Image (cartoon, rainbow, N blue to C red):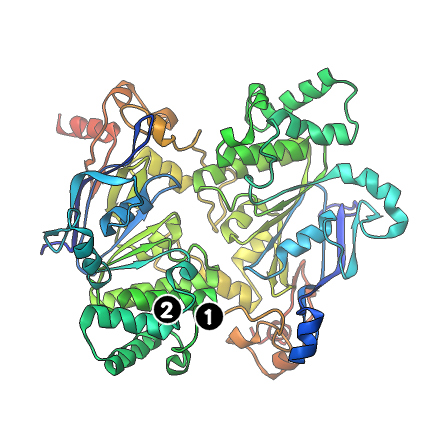
Amino acid sequence: MSEGVAAPLVEAKGLTRIFDVSKPWLNRIIEGERRAYLRAVTGISFDIGRRETLALVGESGSGKSTAARMVVGLLPPTAGTVTIDGIDMWAPASAAERQKLRRRLQMIFQDPYASLNPRWRVDRIIADPIKAFGLARDKAEIAHRVGELLTLVGLSPEDGAKYPHEFSGGQRQRICIARALSSNPEFLVCDEPTSALDVSVQAQILNLMRDLQDRLGLSYLFISHNLAVVRHMATRIGVMYLGRIVELAPSAELFAAPRHPYTRLLMDALPDLGMTGRPRRPIEGEIPNPIAPPPGCAFHPRCPWAFDRCKAEVPELLARDGRAVACHAVEAGRI
Amino acid sequence: MSEPVLSVRNLTVAFPTRRATLTAVDGVSFDIGRGEVLGVVGESGAGKSLTGAAIIGLLEPPGRIVAGEVRLNGQRIDRLPPEEMRKVRGRHIGMVFQDPLTSLNPLYRIGDQIVETIRTHTGLSEEAARERAIALLQEAGIQGARARIDSYPHEFSGGMRQRVVLALALCAEPDLVIADEPTTALDVSIQAQIIALLKRLCRERGTAVMLITHDMGVIAETADRVAVMYAGRIAEIGPVRSVIKEPHHPYTRGLMGAIPSIAGTASRLVQIPGSMPRLAAIPPGCAFHPRCTLAFERCRRERPEPMPAGDCRVACWLVADKRAEASA
């Protein structure tokens, strides 16, 4: 699905994660309850090409962050595979290769306050991955590289001597980006990188991330709940609802003509900054409890186009002309 | 025009600290009329929430109002003794906060909380107040309100809780509702429901609303007029359409360009260099001048007051220059 003939950099196939959310054993015995499981992500598949940005967008509880953590190797999947440049991220056989692969992928988190060690100076924070991967010969080379990275993200090399609390939120996110770039990665997983920032600072960070992508040829997996931010950043977008990808399409096409009812309603629910007078139609109802999701298509209780089949059968993500939709009504040509 | 419901003049809030006195809200003036929604927008640290807290008399010490006045229906409320102010709060001013869990007492059933508020402010009987509470919850979009009125807050979802808080804020039929980031903690699909509800309930009752948010989209959707705040001051205030379509102040212009649009035409977002100044180091003259690409000598020396520009009021010397040119 990615452009070009080269194999995609990242491939996720049938990725599933189930969390055990049961009460303790004794409570289950006394209260006569069974084990409870939460399906955070159910069988999602996607690929990310080189220099491409794939965004996963969805509301809270849709499983987008869980998916990101499985891709980067922080959370083992219950089922399914992630391969990055042909190396399986979770197969025991590829442990040695995976160790080498680690350098090539990095992550940026939502909260720049929580992801920097407050007791370390900035230069030590940024130098840590360089030391861990043995990417520099001596101290002078490390110091030079740290200065280079700080300049790259729009800070000055002198800032390395400061502590994280001396910086504003936007500057801290720049430090996080510098740290992520210090091991010369090819692939960055960004989990809501600008959600904690103000709009004007968000604009600075988004511009920086795009510039870096052009200069360093990075690929991004971009997680966000903000459709406008995703529209700005992504080449392709996967819309998630209750652990499943319901629609996957190139960014421009998704926004020009959303197909899945959930995507359509999500676009309708967006506040309209253009003030075109377009009536805003809120989606009825709420996201169901993921421990006991509705049978069939998880969106059917809120969907105005739902029919009998939606209540019984889970729709599959079917690809057609470069985009994929998981909806019985779309498949049957009803919408 | 009849007398405004809320009239704020030169409101100044300061925090005395050991080193210096920090001015968090600096000479803010605006009016809100009956049935009108005024959006107050700004980035973190702009002083928008403190303006709301000062109006309702809920400033955290050592913060206090050091100058200016607040009038509700013509009567001054910023100098009221705490006991008097307590009666104004709830009866005349309703409040909706960002996090609905913190505005509801987790140990009481929601019905009890609403009934108590109604009885405190109106003197209805227990049964009449309960009927009123059920009607209000129904109106706020809680289905089966009669069955759910005896539930505890934790039994509701985030969106439902915010509906309960909205019902609670409106139950004494206040003249003014101050909503501080009412939808920020909610998902987009729920956010649209709550905004529509707030708008409808206030329009039907003629309640004035002060809507504090950082989200321009919500303002565009909801407000009649908007005040853009920067470093404790109002940078621009005017009808929402004018401010969004033709912003005058360089900060507003930058802010509008910085918002990614779902139309998605711009390849780069407008970037305002730097960040909001800290309270201890607000620059002299116009607080925005170090970040402003159009700043000139006067901006560094003299502080601009809001002056008319079109149907807005804008605190910027460029606007004064244009007016001088036009009249010359």
Please give the chain letter of the residue carrying mark 1: B
Any part of residue B193 in sight: no
Q: Which mark is residue B164?
A: 2
Q: Residue at x 65, y 23 (%)?
A: A146
Secondary structure under the numbered disc 2 in the rendered image: helix
Question: Mark 1 sits on what residue?
Answer: B156
Q: Residue at x 28, y 68 (%)?
A: B201
In the image, residue A188 above or below residue B284? below
Q: Nearer the viewer, residue B269 or A68?
A: A68
> How many numbered circles does the render carry?
2
Please give the chain letter of the residue carrying mark 2: B
Secondary structure under the numbered disc 1 in the rendered image: loop
- Residue sitting farthest toward the right: A93
Any part of residue A31 in sight: yes
Do the residues indicated by labels 1 and 2 lie within the same chain of the protein? yes
Mark sitting earlier along the chain (1/2):
1
Percent position (x, y) of residue B190? 45, 64
Q: Quadrant of the C terminus of chain B?
A: top left
Percent position (x, y) of residue B61? 30, 42
Q: In the rendered view, does B34 fall on the left or right side of B186? A: left
Q: In the rendered view, does B37 fall on the left or right side of A223? A: left
Q: Are marks 1 and 2 in contact (CB under 8 Å)?
A: yes
Q: Residue at x 61, y 80 (%)?
A: A311
Q: Quadrant of residue A301?
A: bottom right
Q: Quadrant of residue B164?
A: bottom left
